[in-house]
Image: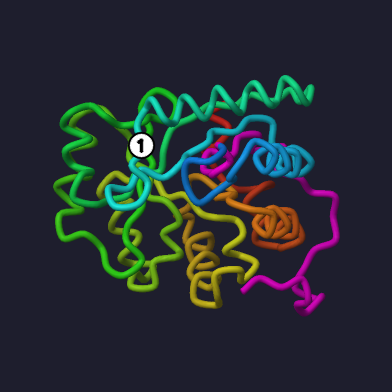
Amino acid sequence: MFSFFKKKERYTDTNLTYSSIAVDMHSHVLPGIDDGAQNPQESIYLIRKMMEAGITKIIATPHIMADYYKNTAESINGALSILKEALVQEQIEIEIEAAAEHYFDETFEDRINNHKLMIIGENYVLFEFSFISPPPNAFPVIQRLIQLGHKPILAHPERYSYLDVDQIRTYRDWGCCLQLNTISLTGYYGKTAQKTAEALIDNQLVDFISSDMHHPKHADAFKYALRLPYVHRLLTDYPLKNILLK
């Protein structure tokens, strides 16, 4: 689990922010529809912290999961409207949009074929795997997304303990972009995820970085990550695609 008390020699001491990427494209700040912010007040707190860290646009991506979070375009856009009203009341000016983090479950392929996806930008689709094992039909479903003109993004591949760097590279070779959680680099999700995240960066395999913000502990880790040399590399000398979503 994440701790502020690590060996100091591992960290840089700078005034670095996330302003160079501008866009956080994976977060759970919409109120009351998944395991992220539970009400507008919590949403506002998280958004303030993201803005303080240099984020100027947020693309909220609540879970769509058949068994737990049965969100639809209607529920997601409804929560977005509530949040936007709260932002106006608090006089907070930030661009915010909504898409989704689609769980690769038994309903995902049907959502693709029935055009029920919540899209990032014009054509990006963010999805996540189970943390236990990859889906056996990953390749044909990813190819179907691409055939339909979508650009698939695999969320936080460093967190799937059953995947090594070469296996993750295979998904990128299939046409997937890869999105890294910056807080993985702090050790928040454990040493294995941290080491995999570092290896993905070393191998130039990261396309997007984001907070995957759910709650205040994530906000603290997101800010603290700015002290890490690997995050410094990502934000100063790395071909990230976040800015394309601005």
Q: Specify the quadrant that holds the N terminus.
A: bottom right
Q: At 80% from the left edge and 63% from the top edge, which residue is drawn?
A: 12
Give percent across and percent down for residue 35. Answer: 50, 51
Badge 1 local density, few (<14 within 10 Å), some, or many (20+)?
many
Give percent across and percent down for residue 182. Answer: 60, 56
- Please state if 103 lies on the left or on the right of 229 as rendered: left
Q: At 59% from the left edge and 45% from the top edge, which residue is drawn?
A: 37
Q: How many marks?
A: 1
Q: Secondary structure at mark 1?
A: strand
Q: Which residue is mark 1?
A: 125
Give percent across and percent down for residue 240. Answer: 54, 42
User: Within the image, what quadrant is residue 75 found in?
Assistant: top left
Its colouring scheme is: rainbow
Q: At 72% from the left edge and 20% from the top edge, which residue is drawn?
A: 88
Q: At 44% from the left edge and 32% from the top edge, which residue is drawn?
A: 99
Task: Give the vertical position of 75 relative to 101 (above or below).
Answer: above
Task: Give the vertical position of 123 relative to 236 (above or below).
Answer: above
Query: Mark 1: which amino acid?
Result: Val
Q: Is residue 224 magenta?
A: no
- The stretch of residues the image draws in magenta is 1-30
- Please state if 167 lies on the left or on the right of 86 as rendered: left
User: Within the image, what quadrant is residue 71 found in?
Assistant: top left
Task: Give the vertical position of 187 relative to 213 (above or below).
Answer: below
Q: Specify the quadrant that holds the C terminus.
A: top right
Closer to the camera, 196 or 217? Answer: 217
Q: Main secondary structure of the magenta part?
A: loop
Closer to the camera, 73 or 159? Answer: 73
Q: Is residue 20 magenta?
A: yes
Give percent across and percent down for residue 202. Answer: 53, 63
Closer to the camera, 82 or 157? Answer: 82
